[in-house]
Amino acid sequence: MRRIFALVSILWLAWAAPAPAADPSSPGTQIVAGARLTALADKTAHALIANTDERELQISSKVPDQAVPLGALEITVQTATLNPNYVAIPLAIYVDKKLVRTVFAGYRIVTYVRTAVAQHDLTAGNLLGEGDVVMGRIPSYGRPPVEAASLIGRKVNISVQRGTPLYFDQTRINEIVLAGQPVVFIIHDGPVAVSADMVARTGGGLGQTVAVYNPVTNKALSGVVTGPGKVEFTLPGGVEVQ
C-alpha cells in the first residue's frame, strides 16, 4: 500500500509540476521569487507534519522563480494533498485578482528509528564489543530496530562502515564451544559443584545452551556456555556458586 501511495504521489507531483518560468527579460512581467513561494509552502507543510525524533519533512521539489504579468500580486496557499509518504502544497498566484498560475512544493515524510549502528569501520570477522556498536538514528527501511547490547559478543560477516545499521543477519554467533570439542561440564547443586570431562555435541556462544555427552557412557546432558570450553548446569532449586 505504501508503494502505491508513493507512486501515485510521484505521478501527481509530476503532472502538477510548475510551469516553466517565462523569460524574466520579457517586457510587462514581474518575478515572483521561488524562495518566497517555498517559504510559504514550508510554513504550511510543517504545520501539518511537525518534525520529531521519529519523522521529519524533507523538501523534494522546490519552486523555481515565476515570471507573471505586471499588476497587483497575491499568493494564496491552497488545500494540501497528504499521504503517509508525501505532502504537496499548492500555491495559487493571482495578478489583479485573476489566477495566473498554480505551482506546487513537494515534501517527503521521512520516518526514523533508533537501532544498532557501527561505532567505527568494521571488517568481516570482527568480534563486536561495547565500543563497536551504539544506538543511532537512521531513516526507517521497514526493518525492526535492533538493540546494540544484543549484538555484543557476535562476529560481523561483512565489512561495514561507521554509522551503518547492523542486524542479526549481518552477524554470527561467536562459538566458544565447538561441536566435537572436549569441554569441562560443571553441575551445581546448591553449594556443591561437580565437574567432569565431556564432549560437546553441539556448538554455541556465551550464554547459549548446548548438548554434551560422556564419551564413555554416551549419556547426554545439556548446559549453558559460560566460557571457552566450559559448560555449566544448575540443578532446579540449586544456587550457582560463583
Image: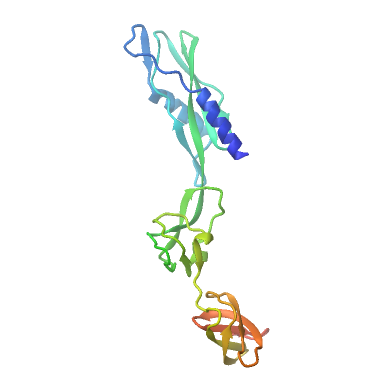
- Left or right of 140? Residue 223 is right
Q: Position of residue 200 (x, y in %)?
A: 57, 82
Please indicate, yes or no, whether residue 144 appears anywhere in the rendered image.
Answer: yes
- Left or right of 187? Residue 156 is left
Chosen colour scheme? rainbow
Residue farthest toward the right in the current orientation of the protein: 236
Q: Position of residue 209 (x, y in %)?
A: 60, 76
Please indicate, yes or no, whether residue 48 appears anywhere in the rendered image.
Answer: no
The count of marks equals 0
**As drawn, 58 above or below 117:** above
Residue 25, picture quadrant: top left
- Left or right of 19? Residue 210 is right
Q: Position of residue 191 (x, y in %)?
A: 60, 91
Residue 218, picture quadrant: bottom right
**As drawn, 11 above or below 110:** above
For the point 54% across and 28% down, which residue is it? 11
- Left or right of 158? Residue 224 is right
Q: Position of residue 68 (x, y in %)?
A: 41, 12
Closest to the observer, 196 or 69: 196
Closest to the observer, 153 or 190: 153
Q: Quadrant of the N terminus?
A: top right
For the point 44% across and 62% down, which residue is it? 133
**As drawn, 161 above or below 233:** above
For the point 54% across and 22% down, which residue is it? 78
For the point 58% across and 38% down, which residue is it? 3
**As drawn, 65 above or below 51:** above
